[in-house]
Image (spheres, rainbow, N blue to C red):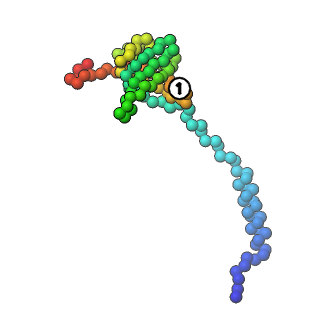
Amino acid sequence: MSHNRMPSALVPILIVILLVAAGAVALLPESPPSPPAATATTDTLTATLHVVDTEARTFAVITGVGHALRLVSMNVDPACEIKVAARASQLQDLAPGQIIRVQYRKTADRISAESIETVQVEDARGGP
């Protein structure tokens, strides 16, 4: 009965090859770190303006979520562009009950409006 045995001279050669390969892997540069996750997301919301606090530079809107209503409070970014009836305006020109479209930035601890514009609502007859 014959056994397939590796010649004893090959064992040290294989050990050296494995050690060289392991050393080469250890010398490879580390992979670059993955880019950090975005810390802020930007989105748009169309809702009914509920309240405006010009001193605190905040406002709240009411929006629908499924079959429920949600009150969303936002800070007004210092560079926020505000338009009422397509004209450049100020925060104090906004009034509760207006439909507004807000482009905002959301971070872990706050929501900041970057632009606010009133939306013209047409009645069922198609007129303004």
Name the quadrant containing residue 93: top left
**Between 25 and 84, which is closer to the camera in this rendering?**
84
In the rendering, at what x and y percent does residue 121 appear? 30, 21
Farthest-out residue, left: 125
**Between 91 and 7, which is closer to the camera in this rendering?**
91
**Between 55 and 67, which is closer to the camera in this rendering?**
67
In the rendering, at what x and y percent does residue 71 appear? 43, 25
Please give the name of the residue rendered at 55% of the width and 27% of the height, measured from the top-left corner.
Answer: 109
Q: Is residue 82 above or below residue 71?
A: above
Please give the name of the residue rendered at 44% of the width and 21% of the height, measured from the top-left corner.
Answer: 60
For the image, the number of numbered tags is: 1
Please give the name of the residue rendered at 35% of the width and 21% of the height, measured from the top-left corner.
Answer: 99
Residue 86 seen in this snapshot: no
Q: Is residue 115 left or right of residue 125?
A: right
In the rendering, at what x and y percent does residue 108 appear? 55, 30
Residue 27 seen in this snapshot: yes
Farthest-out residue, front: 68
For badge 1, the amino acid type reads Arg
Residue for badge 1: 110
In what quadrant of the picture does the C terminus appear?
Answer: top left
Q: Is residue 69 left or right of residue 114?
A: left
Q: Is residue 8 above or below residue 49?
A: below
In what quadrant of the picture does the N terminus appear?
Answer: bottom right
Q: Is residue 46 above or below residue 35?
A: above
Name the quadrant containing residue 124: top left
Q: How many C-alpha atoms fall within 10 Å of the one at disc 1: few (<14), some, or many (≥20)? A: few
Q: Secondary structure at mark 1?
A: loop
In the rendering, at what x and y percent does residue 59 appear? 45, 19
Q: Is residue 110 left or right of residue 65?
A: right
